[in-house]
Image (cartoon, grey):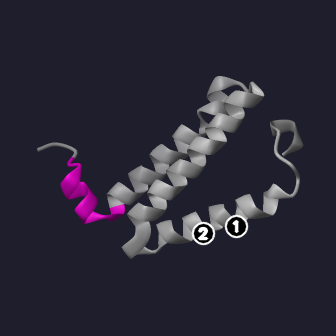
Amino acid sequence: MAQLGWPAGYVTMIGVIELACVLLYLYPRTSVFGAVLTMGLLGGAMATQIRAGSPLFSHILFSIYLGLFMWGGLWLRDAALRAIFPWRR
């Protein structure tokens, strides 16, 4: 974390926040809220990687890759989300 500019004491808090977002995502009634919060967290991770000067495709865009898989999985398991964003009409 020090290489990315974060003090070592923040590791536990970031982990707790990530765990809370994942638990919200896994619970069906709060899955969309959990996905939105996780995307916010991944946006912060992307900003940290940009600030640290990390490689584009392996580090910076990794948050986008995770977000696409997360929203794709949510789209597959949630019929209401499929109704809002249909594959085709």
Residue 33 point in image, percent of width and height: 42, 63
**Mark 1 crowd level (few <14, some 14–19, many ≥20, 10 Å Cα):** few
Mark 2 falls on what kind of element? helix
Residue 7 point in image, percent of width and height: 86, 49
Distance between mark 1 and mark 2 Cα atoms? 6 Å
Q: Tell me where the magenta segment starts and ends, as one range.
A: 77-86
Query: Measured along the vertical axis of the image, is residue 71 above or below residue 4?
Result: below
Residue 5 point in image, percent of width and height: 82, 39
Which image quarter: residue 22?
bottom right
Q: Does 9 sit left or right of 70 as displayed?
A: right
Query: Measured along the vertical axis of the image, is residue 25 above or below residue 11?
Result: below
Residue at position x 57%, y 42% from top?
A: 43
- Residue ID for mark 2: 20
Which of the image's four quarters has the C terminus?
Answer: top left
- Residue ID for mark 1: 16
Residue at position x 24%, y 63% from top?
A: 80
Is residue 78 part of the magenta span, yes or no?
yes
Query: Measured along the vertical axis of the image, is residue 50 above or below residue 5?
Result: above
Observer-nearest residue: 81 or 39? 39
Residue 75 point in image, percent of width and height: 34, 56
Q: Amino acid at mark 2?
A: Ala
Observer-nearest residue: 65 or 39? 39
Q: Amino acid at mark 1?
A: Val
Observer-nearest residue: 15 or 58? 15
What is the chief secondary structure element of the magenta stretch? helix
Query: Measured along the vertical axis of the image, is residue 61 above or below residue 40?
Result: above
Residue at position x 82%, y 45% from top?
A: 6
Residue at the far left in the pictured view: 89
CB atoms at circles 1 and 2 under 8 Å apart?
yes
**Mark 2 crowd level (few <14, some 14–19, many ≥20, 10 Å Cα):** some
